[in-house]
Every structure is written in C-alpha cells, then in structure tokens.
Amino acid sequence: MNNTTNKPTNEELSILIDKATEGDKDALKTIIMSVKDLIFNLSLRTLGTFPDAEDASQDIILKVITHLSSFKKESAFSTWVFSIAINHLKDYKKHMFAKYPLSFEFYKEDILNAPVNDVPDLTQNVEKDILSEELKLSCTNVMLQCLDTESRCIFILGTMFKPDSRIAGDILGITPEAYRQRLSRIRKKMADFLEAYCGEYGTGKCKCRNRLNYAIQSHRLNPVSLEYTGAVEIPMETILNFKAAMEEIDDLSLRFSFCKAYQSTDKIKKFIEDFLNSEQISIIKGEDVQ
C-alpha cells in the first residue's frame, strides 16, 4: 500500500478490482474504504447537510459495489467513482434543500434584515468561538445550495479536487473549455457574494458570532450537535490526489478555504461493514452504470 496516504496504488487497485469481481470480500472492502471519504465529501458539499450526505453516500457506495464489474479500467478508478457519484447527486431529490431551495437573494435578505438582536441567549453555555466556527462552516456549505445543481457540481469539483479540465469534463460530460469557463464564472459569483455580504470571508456586515442565537432559534445551529467542528478534518490528498493533472483555473482559491475535507462518518463505516457481512453481497454482478 501507499504509505503516504494509506491508499492502494493504481496497480494495487487494478488487482483488487479483479479479485473483488471474483467474490473476494476483503478486496472489495479495501476498494470501498479507499473511496468512502471522497464520496462523503462530494455528497456533503452537493447536498448541504451531514444526514443527507450520509444517506446519499450509502446509495452511491451501493452503486459502486454493484457496478464494479462494469469498470473497464479505461480511466482512473477515482474518475469512474466521481462519474457515478455526480450522476447520482445531480438527480438526488430526497435532500432537505430539494424541498426548500435557496437563492442568493434569500441569503442577502436574511443577512441584511434578520432580527439578530431580538433573540435571547440560546447558546446553552457552549463556547461561543466553537459555535461561531460551526456556524461559519455550516453557512458557507449551505450557501452552495444557492447554485443550481450542475453549477454546484462544477464548483465543488473545481474548488475542492482541482482536476485537469479534461478529467473534469469527462466526469461532468462537458468539454474542457466549457468546464473552465463555467467554473471561472461560478467561482467569481460565489467570491463576489462572499466579499459583499460575508464578514468572515469578505468585507460584509454578517459576522457569525453576532448571529449565534438567531441561528439557534431558526434551527440552523444546534449547540448540542456540532457536526463540522465535531468531524475529523483530513488533508485533501488522503481523499484524492490528482498531482499530475491539477489545474488552477483562477486566483480565487483562498476565498474558498471553507471547502475542507472530513472523514466519512461512523454511520457510513458501519453501513459498509454491515453490507459486506450480509447476504446482499451476492448481488455483485456485471451491470451497466445508469
């Protein structure tokens, strides 16, 4: 194994995939464990909340398992997984924001006119610095829901994972040039909004510390369940490293430092363990990815 990231090398993956499609559960477990964090982080940024990301990640993991024999090794395994995940997430309708869509106009109105000073202290004696960091990470992630689904996928892929535009184009089903142009426009739109209205990542009036009680009252923040600050942050290269094919589209990277990577949750790890130990594992067979 690669000792730097504890992930299989491309050559090891190829062997493991052959073994897994022949029924080797240990090989299959190694493969799935190598991509679970990639799948979870992509789902979290696309859907906006930890519970929705957990549910979607389980669906995607099942697709990867049941369609593994259709992987022809014509691209990197991670590229194939990305394609499955993004196609699934584009059509995902079970998440909270599918029912309650957001917009930049909504965010702007809330920032400018929310009655943040009319709410009593609801912080339940939790340290305000911790709550402020939780709100900052949650708010900026949810803000991605103001983008349409495809724009969100383009932003997440280009901002977090930074593949070469040829790889990104293959994953998204668009030309490299279209990908570069759209990513640049979307990142500028996000950066301009943060600069104008966010006091944490720009010069706006919105400061997380001043909005804690309002956020708790409106159920955007739960002092007894801190997901972002409670999650284990990991280096991006432990999820995926495009090293030889990374491409910097613009100079806005520092504006999006909230795009951190996290270990997938215990719920996902338990799902993988339970599934691999169940009778359902027998459904592994050659199917075409939908």
Image (cartoon, rainbow, N blue to C red):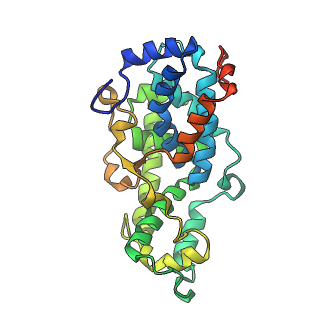
Q: Position of residue 43 (x, y in %)?
A: 55, 43
Q: Is residue 18 above or below residue 207?
A: above
Q: What residue appears at the point 33 percent right and 44 percent down from the top-left corner?
A: 235
Q: Is residue 108 above or below residue 178?
A: below
Outermost residue to the left: 4
Q: Quadrant of the C terminus?
A: top right
Q: Position of residue 195 (x, y in %)?
A: 39, 64
Q: Position of residue 33 (x, y in %)?
A: 47, 32
Total number of numbered discs in the rendering:
0
Q: Is residue 200 above or below residue 75?
A: below
In this view of the protein, can residue 182 be seen by the observer?
Answer: no
Q: Position of residue 44 (x, y in %)?
A: 53, 48
Q: Is residue 38 left or right of residue 215?
A: left
Which one is nearer the viewer's eye here, 148 or 208?
A: 208
Q: What residue appears at the point 53 percent right and 69 percent down from the top-left corner?
A: 224
Q: Is residue 210 left or right of residue 103?
A: left
Q: Quadrant of residue 176?
A: top left
Q: What residue appears at the point 36 percent right and 37 percent down from the top-left corner?
A: 238
Q: What residue appears at the point 66 percent right and 15 percent down from the top-left corner?
A: 285
Which one is nearer the viewer's eye here, 137 or 169?
A: 137
Q: Is residue 188 left or right of residue 290?
A: left
Q: Quadrant of the N terminus?
A: top left
In this view of the protein, can residue 57 be seen by the observer?
Answer: yes
